Image: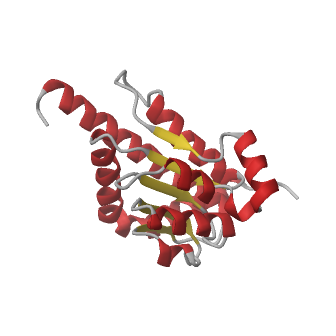
Amino acid sequence: MKMNFSSQLNELVAVLHAFAPQAEAVERVVTLVADGLLAGHTLFTCGNGGSATDAMHLAEELVGRYRGNRRPLPAVSLNADPTALTCIANDFGFEQVFARQLKALARPGDMLVVFSTSGNSPNILRALEAARNAGVVCIALLGKDGGPALALADYAIVVPSQNSARIQEVHTLLLHAMCEAVEQQVAQDQTGDG
């Protein structure tokens, strides 16, 4: 069967069009993330599979840089350390791989961004529960109907699609929006305009 890129592109355009009414909610979340990081709070991220790469992508852009040079910002991808993941999975079960790290590292006022196309993964749900118990602001980037993660998040952005690939493509747009907002705010703070 021949791949039809045009149909994939048209599907993505339709998803973006359906997603557009959430722009104001997205702006609130990206401002919240930028404000929290600039106040010295840590941003934690996590996800499974392709969503794990989104989680790592967001964290590395904040610690390193997105576009411009600026000070490094505190961000940790909870799926980046294979020793922690395998130890916790072996001793406590895979459902606890993110929650246990949050219990050790997170402080009130910190933020957690979870990436999940379904909102159903037990380890994501346990992470949201642990974060809430620690006074961490919970942000969920989801898809489909949001799953049980929707109710556990303080802020949820749900991509209106059943296709995991299209959901993840919009999640990449969202993580880049967070990076852009952070870098703009850091630039303002450095020039004294903020």
Residue 172 seen in render:
no
**81 vs 89: above or below:** above
Counting from the top left corner in percent of width and height, residue 88 is at 73, 53
Residue 186 seen in render:
yes
Question: Residue 179: which quarter of the image?
Answer: top left
Left or right of 11, for residue 74: left
Counting from the top left corner in percent of width and height, residue 80 is at 65, 40
Question: Residue 97: which quarter of the image?
Answer: bottom right
Counting from the top left corner in percent of width and height, residue 72 is at 40, 27
Q: Quadrant of the C terminus?
A: top left
Q: Nearer the viewer, residue 135 or 111?
A: 135
Q: What's the residue at 49%, 74% (across, down)? A: 152
**69 vs 60: above or below:** above
Left or right of 97, for residue 144: left
Left or right of 171, for residue 50: right
Q: What's the residue at 59%, 74% (across, down)? A: 144
Q: Nearer the viewer, residue 163 or 61?
A: 61
Question: Residue 38: which quarter of the image?
Answer: top left
Counting from the top left corner in percent of width and height, residue 153 is at 45, 70
Q: What's the residue at 88%, 59% (across, down)? A: 1
- Farthest residue, direction left: 193
Q: Nearer the viewer, residue 29 or 162?
A: 29
Q: What's the residue at 37%, 21% (across, down)? A: 69
**166 vs 75: above or below:** below
- Farthest residue, direction right: 1
Colouring: secondary structure
Q: How many marks?
A: 0
